[in-house]
Amino acid sequence: MRKQLLAIGVVLFVAATVSAQTVAYDPSAETSISGIIRYAISAVGPDGTVGLHLEVTTNDGPVRVHVGPAMFIGMNNFSFLKDETVAIRGARVTKSGETAIWARLIVKDGKTLVLRDDDGTPRWPRATIEDPDGCGVEHAPIR
């Protein structure tokens, strides 16, 4: 009986932890910031997608920004470098104790990169059997 209670407790804890980590884009949490890129870094997601993250220095201090897949950014002829000025619209999200903005659109040098629809749905392609990395070109997996 004790082992069953312990097992149930562990399952409930894991379920609560997993559900707490599930975060969705919330359009009602949207905000706008502008500032200068302090740094741009890439991060590899669990599915192998390389994502771009920025830290933007604003008048209110530094803000972390999750931009989107590097492949999608490149497909739209965009890039981000240190010391560039940007304006960003996106939703504030807290996940794993970190608060950041998930960008919906970014304006730089008069050009706008739209990353998400108004409801927060990502605009980048999703991986399929025919397109394993979501790049839009059918090819064998690259290793």
Image (cartoon, rainbow, N blue to C red):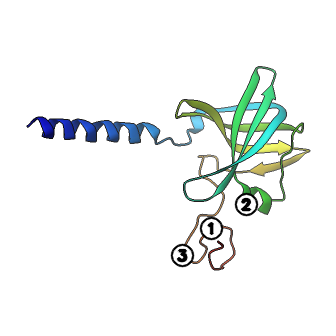
Task: Give the camera-side residue of 13 and 19.
Answer: 13
Q: At which x and y percent is residue 89?
A: 72, 38
Callout 2 amino acid: Met
Question: CA gap, disc 1 to disc 2?
Answer: 9 Å
Callout 1 amino acid: Asp
Q: Residues within 10 Å of mark 1 (few under 14, many from 20)?
A: many
**8 horizontally vs 128: left or right:** left
Q: Which residue is mark 2?
A: 71
Q: Quadrant of the N terminus?
A: top left
**136 horizontally vs 95: left or right:** right
Precedes in sequence: disc 1 or disc 2 = 2
Answer with the quarter of the image where residue 102 lies.
top right
Q: Which residue is mark 3?
A: 129
Q: Which residue is mark 1?
A: 133
Q: Residues within 10 Å of mark 3 (few under 14, many from 20)?
A: few
Question: CA gap, disc 2 to disc 3?
Answer: 18 Å
Question: CA gap, disc 3 to disc 1?
Answer: 9 Å
Under tag 3, what secondary structure? loop
Q: Residue at x 39, y 40 (%)?
A: 19
Q: Residue at x 35, y 37 (%)?
A: 16
Under tag 2, what secondary structure? helix
Q: At which x and y percent is residue 39?
A: 80, 38
Callout 3 amino acid: Ile
Under tag 1, what secondary structure? loop
Q: Are marks 3 and 1 in contact (CB under 8 Å)?
A: no
Q: At which x and y percent is residue 6?
A: 19, 36
Q: Residue at x 54, y 30 (%)?
A: 97
Q: Are marks 1 and 2 in contact (CB under 8 Å)?
A: yes
**36 horizontally vs 50: left or right:** right
Q: Are marks 2 and 3 in contact (CB under 8 Å)?
A: no
Q: At which x and y percent is residue 109?
A: 91, 44
